[in-house]
Image (cartoon, grey):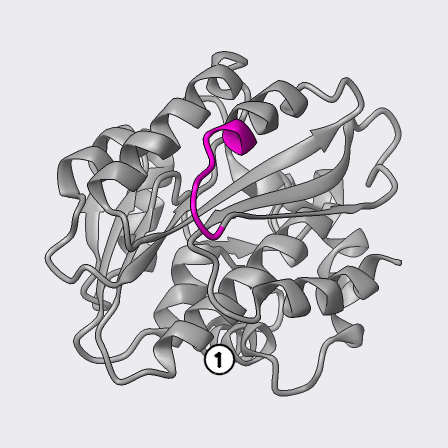
Amino acid sequence: MLSYQHIYHAGNPADVHKHALLCWMLARMGAKPKPLTYLESHAGRGLYDLDAPEARRTGEADAGIGALLGGLAADHPYLRALAAVRAAHGARFYAGSPRLAVELARPGDAMHLAELHPGEFDALHDTMRGYGARLHRQDGLEMAMSLCPPQVRRGLMLIDPSWEVKTEYRSIPDALQKLHRKWNVGVLVLWYPLLRDARHRTMLAGLEAAGLPGAVRHEVTFPPVRAGHGMIGSGLFIVNAPFGLEEEAARIATLFA
């Protein structure tokens, strides 16, 4: 969807849920001395100025990183990565998942990022300059189908659509099954919003019926970040979930209690 720009939502409660668990998974997988491939289907611009007019217009970060991070352990990989980004760019910046992943990457790791929006892609190019990531201005799932299995087979893919196209809810279960068949050892991480109309339920029924291995579903709920906002929670569906994920997800859930 070429209208979506995450700057309006950066640092909101869903970002805290998604990024805290993403960083934990990358740190967990990176603890072994074997290289990783990181892929992302909808990378956005990778770095967000929370003083920008778009971010201040919605103020969603106030209910997210402004209210929730104090409940994390000081050495949590999410906080470590975010602190490194802010040390480089300033305290009012928030890192998108590509920039967080850079902070947790090691020599020998590979990274492929897809972004279709022309303005967001140009900003992503600036954000990721010098980090060795391969950028793809194309549909993220098409990128994944063409690259999987990656040369470095051990790795993780984040699938994080805008969900502004309702057909995505119907197509995602089939896409995840195809990706898993091509890359059966890859950790596949799907983020989805919990909306008042519960449109995600049919998609989840399809995913759960597929019997994908090591599947973990985790959801948190929170009040709407502003009047009239339809998102009331955040969900992750993870295939080949790393060991210990369910325990970490339970800890993250306490932030939203």
Outermost residue on the left side: it is: 151
Please indicate, yes or no, whether residue 230 appears anywhere in the rendered image.
yes
Look at mark 1 in the image and give the residue it sits on: 84
31 lies left or right of 85: left
151 versus 243 height, above or below: above
Identify the residue at image location x=38%, y=23%: 174
Say which element carries label 1.
helix
Decide: few, some or many residues near mark 1? Use Cα within 10 Å; few <14, some 14-19, many ≥20: some
| Main SS of residues in magenta | loop
In the image, what residue type sits under mark 1?
Ala
Q: Is residue 208 left or right of residue 70?
A: left
Q: Is residue 211 magenta?
A: yes
Quarter residue 16 falls in: bottom right
- Given residues 116 and 105, the one toward you in this image is 105
Horizontal and vertical percent position of residue 17: 66, 55
Q: What's drawn in magenta, residue-wise?
A: 207-214
Q: Where in the figure is residue 252, as x and y percent of width and height?
A: 72, 65
Q: Where does the image place residue 220, in percent across and percent down from the top left?
A: 76, 48
